[in-house]
Image: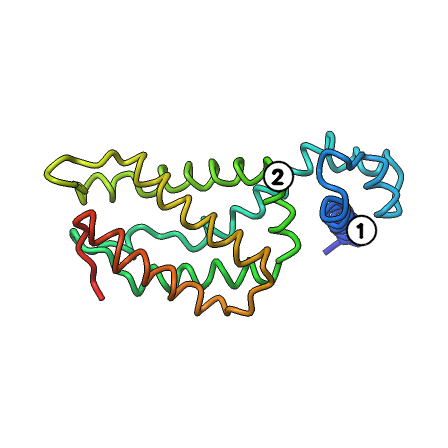
Amino acid sequence: MKKTDLRVKRTNKMIIDAFIHLVEKSGFEQVTVQDIADEAMINRATFYAHYKDKQDLYETIFDYALTAFTSVLNPAELVKGNLIKVKHIELMMTKIYRNIQENRKFYLTIMDGSANEILRKKIADILNEQYADIFNRLKITENDIEVPMDFIIEYMTSIFIGTLHWWLTTDSQMTPEHLAKLVIKLVGNGHLTVLGIEIEK
């Protein structure tokens, strides 16, 4: 790898680290490009060589965060016929939670204030894109009335975001494995079965 490439990567990491630190301390709205440049010990021109503005930086961080979800999502491994393979989902969730635990400050930053709703929408969009065919195939019903897929997606997203926010903000000592097992147990033994979804233990 060229020295120039290493320098660019190092500078980019300094910018991201500075941004996360500042947002954690002051909140996104209060942080300026000059603040980021000062914290990263670079000039504004260097910042603009990497990003258009702080919103561009913020969205780049968001995209990076979402790779933690998309990299482990494989619909084909999670459903067998009309059965939800809970063990596979538990392993998938554990991988996601481990990544989040290793980058705790990073994820706290993207869940700051209104960003929480942005994250919720992006995750819902990912689930819609990758799992639409699965939920349609399962034909989830309640009292013989088919439950809308977008309702199920929103519901599952809310559970995930809610438990994740609790885990990050309460300094819980719960391990990623334990959290994944607990979430899957509550959802699998309760909400999914109530909706008539068959579970493969």
Dividing the picture into quarters, in which one does residue 185 lie? bottom left
- Count numbered badges in the picture: 2
Q: Which residue is mark 2?
A: 113
Q: Is residue 119 left or right of residue 87?
A: right
Which badge, 1 or 2, is on the more N-terminal residue? 1
**Considering the numbered disc 2 on the image, is that residue within a helix, a strand or a loop?**
loop
Marks 1 & 2, CB-CB < 8 Å contact: no
Q: Disc 1 residue type?
A: Arg
Q: Disc 2 residue type?
A: Gly
Classify mark 2: residues with Cα within 10 Å, few (<14), some (14-19) or many (20+).
few
- Residue found at x 45% / y 42%: 123
Q: Is residue 44 left or right of residue 144?
A: right
Q: CA distance from mark 1 to mark 2?
A: 33 Å
Nearer-the-camera pick, 134 or 107: 107
Rendered location of residue 197, percent (x, y): 19, 51
Dividing the picture into quarters, in which one does residue 93 lie? bottom left
Classify mark 1: residues with Cα within 10 Å, few (<14), some (14-19) or many (20+).
few
Q: Which residue is mark 1?
A: 7
Q: Is residue 52 above or below residue 106?
A: above
- Residue found at x 20% / y 47%: 195
**Considering the numbered disc 1 on the image, is that residue within a helix, a strand or a loop?**
helix
Looking at the image, the residue that sits furthest to the top is 52
- Residue found at x 73% / y 30%: 52
Rendered location of residue 168, percent (x, y): 57, 57
Looking at the image, the residue that sits furthest to the left is 144
Q: Is residue 106 above or below residue 28?
A: below
- On residue 107, the disc is none
Q: Is residue 150 left or right of residue 8?
A: left
Rendered location of residue 22, percent (x, y): 77, 46
Which quadrant is the C terminus positioned in? bottom left
Which quadrant is the N terminus positioned in? bottom right
